[in-house]
Amino acid sequence: MNPPSAVECREGWRIGRQLAALFFDAYRKLLNDPRREKTRRGSLRLWPFGYDQGMQPLILLTNFAKATFTRPTTFAHRNDGWCWLFGWCLGLLCLCCWIGCKPSAPANSVVPNEEPKPVVNEPFSLREQIAQQVRDGRPAEAIKLLDELIATKPAEEVALASQAASLAFEAGDASEAMRRLRELIQAHPQNVELRRDYAGLLAQRGYRFDANVQYRLLAGRVGLSPPELIGLIYPHRPQVNFESKPDIKDRDAVDRKGVLSVVAALRSRGDLQEAIDVLATSDEIKRNDPAAVAMLGWLYASAQQESQWIDWAIETDAKRLRRYPAYWLSWGIALRDGVLASQTDVKPATLSRRNDFAARCFLEAIRREPHSQVAWDSLSATLEVLDAESKVVSAREGSLKDARERLSERLLQLDETQWLANQLWNAQSSPVSREEQAEMFDRLADLLWKQGCLGESLGWQSLLASMHPIRDWSTLRRTTQETFTKHPKGIDERVLLVGLDLEQFADQSSVWMEALARRTRSETATGNPPPTSIESPQARLVDVASEVGIHFQWFNAVDPVESEFRLHEPLGGGVACLDFDADGRVDFYFNQAAGEATTRSGVKPNALYRQLDGKFTNIVDVSMSDDRGYGHGVTAGDWNQDGWPDLLLANFGENALLINQADGTFEKHLLSELSETESVSSESFTLSAAIADVTGDQLPDIVEVNYVDDSAVRKPIERTPDGTPVKLPGPLHFQPALSEVLVSNGKGAGRRQSLGDSAQSRSTGMGVMIADMDQQPGNEIFVANDQRANHFWFQAGDANEEQEWRNQAAIRGVAVGPGGDKNACMGIAMADFNRDQKLDLHVSNFYDEWANHFCQTSAGMFADRAVAFGIDQLTSRTTGFGVQGLDYDNNGWIDLLVANGHVEDLTDRGTPFRMKTQLLVNQGKRFELAKMDDPDGQWERERLGRGVATCDFDRDGRLDAVVTYADSAAELLRNETEAVGNYIQLRLIGTRSERDAIGAHIELTAGDQVWTSVVTAGDGYACRNEAILHFGLGDVATLDSIAVQWPSGEVQRWDTINSKPIDVNRRVGIVEGLKEPFEDR
């Protein structure tokens, strides 16, 4: 027998629902029937409570069945035999109850003979005509006839008009269906099922906010299903399933799914430009649909399309849009990112309070969508900025600082709420036990109550009660009545907004709108600056690793795992470029795993390749530099300040420090042996590390960037009986870690400090960059975090005091990506990419998330300009790990070399696994994919790229690179590009400053040209660059000056070297305090 069709399933439910309605109606009449003595003594006493309490389990069952099996929701239709059978069985059950409970007339009653009323034939004729039109596939004609029937049968308006809406939807006119249901609800506001039908249709078509308004009205008052309640927790996700990325060129598919659903799917994948393209040309925008118009503004702001956003803001009717959270998010982002400040002529007083208005905008969005992660994260960042500006705003419970503390707690609650909702979502395909489900219902109810979402909390309590019939329904009913009496909307707004008084943040809408109105379209239609025409030669970077004697491959286990990885297994290992023997030629150290995490049981050694006459020899054994920990990252630096670079190995397990003995050997120490205090982490899992002075005492410290702190990482993946993983692990499945600093005591040891000590300081660190990024005394620590906000650590207190570390990532503009999204950040490159004499940060990200390109706008403040530089189009379809700035053709503009590769084989879902390495060419105002001189097809190979480090291993003035992979041998890319410009390389040696001079700023001048750089440590993901500063100079043959600002504060400047002009195409050594630089051969 074939399974029933979707139509049959719905018909089964329809009949069952009608029979159930008859039963409920009959029972309600019975409660008020004077002849109900028999009923009191009979079967209906099986309900021990009143009508509402007694019927609640059956109502819940009915509602849950309908939502689960027939309603178009996020959670796929169940058009199978179970649905069909369920609908019919429920109908028969209700029919039996109705027949059995219908009161009989008293025995002595007399039923008078009544003449039958005349039958009106017209409605029956109309019904037959309607049925015929439906059978003939003419829904428009059927709808017209239904409207006629409604006029003659007003008592049946709800059923008939609902049928008309259903026909309109099935005919492809969703807007008409929504209009009819909306008008029905206005006429029948107490009809719960009608409201749920309307909400379900809105959600399916992508009108998430409008749908959630309806669901919030119902939550706690009627029994909503888990899918409906979960939809409230994820307000910006699509409510229909997308097996793969929507194809915006397939207009029929877009129309079937709903353009706003498609936009939500694209936005959640990071495809902002495609979301804009499909929405801007849609019928919804043409007919000025307010939800669509508000969404378009949010997309423009998130995608940094300033001129388009300004035009949108000028032309839209704000009064129609203010009810939508997308409208407020759009304005908040534009204010936060400085779009309005740069495009209007508002008074300084207004401009100085733009962050107050931005905070107001994000609060308005939260009032409308209490679980908007984007709004909460953006509010947190904005309040940090306001606090830093010392604008203490009075709140009901104290200062803004107090509110920020409550906000930190709220963010943790929101994280847990979303995690639980996600677990329940996954339970559809991987069911959990009844006890686990009850625990999650209970915890969600508690969390939502604490967040002020009272109706939602009651909704989950109702579901919990339906699982435990012995629970006191009367108590729940009393709580519900008291709650809605005090808070009719089901929300305690004071709790929701963490005690912040909305009116304390000025609504400056009218002021900014007046400023915008003074502009014309011609003033705003400048768009992103066009790319400059910088001539770039074909790039030629050739792998010569085997040719020069380098044969190294990282392995993730004794028996390598190729897919379905545990968290640590696809992350790869890194490389350090260092001159360990001080012969002027760079050597390479590779970290290896090839064992089980934390056990120091690796079956393959690390590798130290020493360079002699352009060839490399692995001397890891004779140099006593091996380590059998589960290796990831590696870095180099002069820990003991003896002039010989040491090595720091970042492991999953204890990290190791290899002290260079200056005789070709190393002495190994586990960091626990050098620490005067214990680590705060119980499970050391370090991906990247750095050696640099971060306390200001001119002694190098050790910075360990930790990923997670959870022993569950090492557990085998749980599988079903057929071997399929129950779920694949991700970083948010485990407890995040605190990163740490081993503060040097100057005697070869130190004391441990954590970077922050609160739960908010824990994160999933992958990459690290240390430098003086704001040209204020002291180095800062930038940490790229995986699926959590980035950290930007500044020190408070001087070198003689206990350090207090403050995360200022949100204040500085580098915490999150466009629109406030937390990205899966990994690699980091630092350089003056746009040649404005300020250092910028480029951060690689996950698939469907383009890279961040944080350009420094003022001292220590950044704005993400990825879209303006075209980086979104180049990186959104890659998973970027290691990235380095590399001026491959020495034209003075820093390019980008990116190693790409996914962390899991999802090719069956259309997501690439292995990926190509990319060279992105800096064209001044845009980046473009390099044109490679690649006759052997090397750059077409797809692999799991991981670490990238730069060096000039052959000393020819063209920067080379080492790239490591998780699935193949490491590459040494020799730069053989022809027609390159001039260059100069500098090597700095500190004396008053620490010897590696981390944080020193360098400025070169030639005519009106200026080149800026800084000495860094960490160098991003798992790697260490050669400790030189390389400047491409184009056709400049002589420099006018070299200036160095040392970490100690000393500044030196040279206009000549040894009384001669500063010639180029050489490497120069500079010693702090020494009168003249020297030729560094």
Image: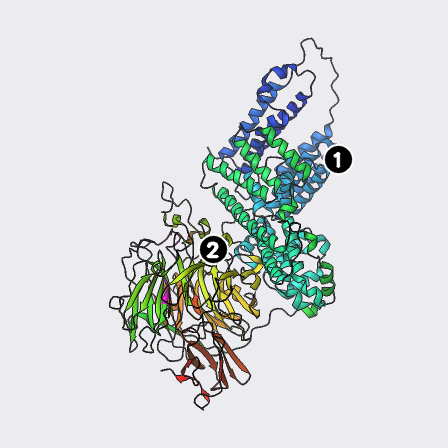
Which mark, by number, is residue 131?
A: none
Residue 875: image x %, image y %?
Answer: 49, 63
**Image height of 367 relative to 490, above or below:** below
Q: In which quarter of the image is residue 38?
A: top right
In the displayed image of the protein, which residue is found farthest to the front? 800
Front residue of 223 and 749: 749
Front residue of 78 and 804: 804
Which mark, by number, is residue 763?
A: 2
In the rendered image, residue 561 lying in the magenta stretch gets the answer yes
Residue 603: image x %, image y %?
Answer: 27, 57
In the rendered image, residue 717 lying in the magenta stretch gets the answer no
Q: From the image, state whether disc 1 or disc 2 is nearer to you.
A: 2
Q: In this view, does 809 lie to the left or right of 563?
A: right
Query: If the image is split into quadrants, where does the C terminus sit?
Result: bottom left
Q: Which colour scheme is used?
A: rainbow
In the displayed image of the protein, which residue is found farthest to the top? 108
Residue at the spot x=64%, y=70% of the render? 526
| Magenta region, residue range | 556-575
* Circle 1: residue type: Ala
Residue that carries the numbered disc 1 in the rendered image: 151
| Residues at circles 1 and 2 in contact by the CB criterion of under 8 Å | no
Crowding near the residue tagged with mark 2, few <14, some 14–19, many ≥20 C-alpha atoms within 10 Å: many
Q: Which of marks 2 and 1 precedes in the sequence? A: 1
Residue 550: image x %, image y %?
Answer: 30, 69
Q: Is residue 283 at all visible to an observer of this figure?
A: no
Disc 1 to disc 2, C-alpha distance: 63 Å
* Circle 2: residue type: Ser
Front residue of 358 and 515: 358
Q: Under tag 1, what secondary structure?
A: helix
Magenta segment main secondary structure:
loop
In the displayed image of the protein, which residue is found farthest to the left? 622
